[in-house]
Image: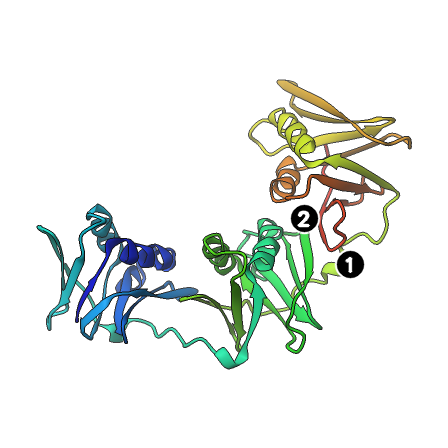
Amino acid sequence: MQIICSKPELLKGIQTVQSAVSTKGTLPVLSNILLETSANQLKLAATDLEVGIKCFIKAEIVKEGSLTIPAKMFSDFIRTLWDDQEIKIVVDEAAKMEIRCGKARCVLSGLSKEEFPVLPDFQEDKAISIEVKILQEMIKKTVFSVSTDETRYILNGVYFILDKGVVKMVATDGRRLAFISRPVKENKAAFTVIIPSKAIKEVERLLTAESENTEVKISITENQVAFKIKETVIISRLIEGNFPNYEQVIPKQSGIKIKLATRDLLATTQRAALGCGDRGGAIKFILEKGRMRAIGAAQGRVEVEDELPVDYAGQLLEIAFNPAFVLDVLKNTENAEIVMEFSSALNPGVIRPSGDDQALSVIMPMRA
C-alpha cells in the first residue's frame, strides 16, 4: 500500500474512529486501527467488538492495500507532524508501515487485515433518515438517565421506538427516567430496539460537528444498529431483552404545577447541593405560599439554603431529590423555563420544558 494525504485529513479520520479502539487488550488487533484503500479514498476503522466505527477520508492512492497498526502510536506520531506538509505512507510485504513527513520518519509493525473483525456494510435499502438536530436533541435529553449498573444490562441503553412517523427515546436507571417524542418524516418503518449507551454517545459526539440540515441514516438489522453520518458509519450490537414498561412510571396526573426559570433553578440547586457534601445526599425542596426553598445539609457540618419566588398558594409540600438528577435535567434543557410537577412527598416528581408536552424527566424522591 502506498498513499499520500494531508495531516488535517488523516487526523480527522483517526479522531473519528479512535474511541472505538479497545483498551482491554483481549486481542492485540483490537488495539489497532485498520487502514485500507478504497477507490480514491482511504478507509479507517476501529472496533472493540461492541461498537465499530469506520470512515473515509481524502487521499491520493498510489498503490492499493491494507494494514492494521497500533492506534496510540500512530495517532501520537501524526499529531506531531506539520499541518502544511503532505504525509506519505508506504506498507511493505512484511506488514511494516513507514510514515514520512518532511524529514520526520516513523516505522510501525502492524497486523494483516485478515486478523481484523469484519465490520458489515451499511444496509442502505433498510435505512431510515432523521434530521441531525432532532436526533441530537433526543439523545441529549435522555442519555444521562441510562443506568451504569452492568447487572441491569437492559437499562444500559436507550430504548428507541419508531412508529407511525413518531420517534421516541426513553432511558432509566430505576431511580429516574427521561422521555422524549418527536415527529419525523419517516412514516412507513416501525421498530423498537435498545441501543447501548456507548454507541449512542458516539453518535452524539459525531453529530456535534454536523450542520443542522444534515440527515442521519439509521439501519436496523436482527441484532445490530448502524448510524451513517456523511462518510462515517457507527455500528453497534443491540441489547437483547424487554425494556420495562416506562409508561407506568410516568405520573398520569399531578395536583401541583409550578413554572420556574431554568437558569434560576439550576443556580439554586447547585448552591443547595453544596450542603450535601461529597456523599451524594439529598436536597429538600420546600414549597410554600409564594416561594420554593432548596436546602442541602450534611450531618450538621454544613447547611446551604436558597429560595425562589413561585406562583403558588397551596399547602406546604416538602420533597427531597438527588440534586445530581435535577441538575442533569436542567443542564440539558434549552428552554428558558421549566415546569415542575408534584402530587405528594412520596410520589415521583416530574420536570418538563415549558411549552413542550413531549419531553419530560421523572425523578424518584429520597429521604432527606
Mark 2 belongs to which amino acid?
Answer: Arg
> Measured from the top left, where is residue 284 in percent x and y?
73, 30
Image quadrant in which the N terminus is located = bottom left
Residue drawn at x 28%, y 76% as measured from the top left: 39
Residue drawn at x 32%, y 62% as measured from the top left: 26
Residue drawn at x 62%, y 50% as measured from the top left: 141
Q: Residues within 10 Å of mark 2 (few under 14, many from 20)?
A: many
Mark 1 or mark 2: whose residue is earlier in sequence: 2
Q: Quadrant of residue 56?
A: bottom left
> Measured from the top left, where is residue 246 in percent x and y?
72, 59
Q: Residues at badges 1 and 2 in contact (C-beta under 8 Å)?
A: no
Judged from this view, the residue extending furthest toward the bottom is 125
Tag on residue 248?
Answer: 1
Residue where numbered disc 2 is placed: 176
> Measured from the top left, where is residue 124 in percent x and y?
49, 78
As helix, strand or loop, the secondary structure at mark 2 comes to strand
Q: Is there any visible trace of residue 96 in the rendered image?
A: no
